[in-house]
Amino acid sequence: MLQPASLFTRIAIGKGIGLIVGLICMASLPLFLADIDTLFRWGVLFWYTTMGAFIGVFGVFTWHPVLKLPMPWWFRSTLIGAWMNFVLVLLTHTQLDAMLQAPFVQGSILASPWWLVPEGGVVGLMIGFFATLAGGEGKAIVDERPPVEEPSARFSNKL
């Protein structure tokens, strides 16, 4: 870890890397389909930014409470990235299928929209690595809250 553990740092790093990946995807989508919808491109940008935020937030969970198993950063971030892209494929399968009919994709494994699921796992792994490196993980990233005064105690001194 490069600095003291911080949930804010994890989320910021996750969103930053997600934003970079989203910008790369947003810029490269017209290579696959020239008349791609602008809203779809913006959606992909925000999708990867949200994925980064989710991976950052889930850095708190290092133990699965139901299965009683440890959840290391590489498992957690890969699972979240793959799951998020699985949902993306389910929501946009028709548009992805039309987009992946580009001449240089025909006949390859990239012709299926489902390749986005392992791609999401790889992106999630990358986001999780840098978020854990910069912000830490587990209970250490959650700041302890100072004790809160009772409202009645604050107002009783002023009366």
Image: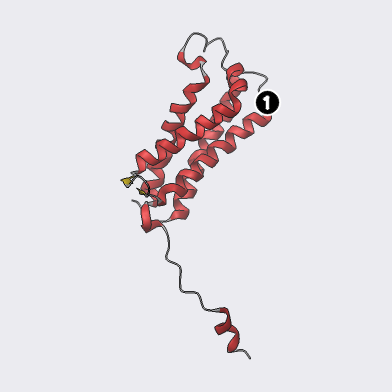
Q: Position of residue 86 (x, y in %)?
A: 50, 30
Instruction: Please report the residue visible at 37 percent of the width from the left and 51 percent of the height from the top.
Output: 136
Q: Which residue is mark 1?
A: 37
Q: Is residue 73 above or below residue 89?
A: below
Q: Is residue 22 above or below residue 70?
A: above
Q: Position of residue 28 (x, y in %)?
A: 56, 25
Residue 3 can be seen, yes or no: no
Instruction: Please report the residue visible at 45 percent of the width from the left and 43 percent of the height from the top.
Output: 55
63 and 95: which one is in front?
63
11 and 71: which one is in front?
71
Looking at the image, the residue that sits furthest to the front is 66
Q: How many discs appear?
A: 1
Task: Check the picture and name the quadrant holding the C terminus.
Answer: bottom right
Instruction: Please report the residue visible at 49 percent of the width from the left and 8 percent of the height from the top.
Output: 107
Q: Is residue 115 above or below residue 54?
A: above
Categorize mark 1 by other alpha carbons within 10 Å: few (<14), some (14-19), many (20+).
few
Q: Position of residue 118 (x, y in %)?
A: 43, 27
Q: Is residue 26 left or right of residue 73?
A: right
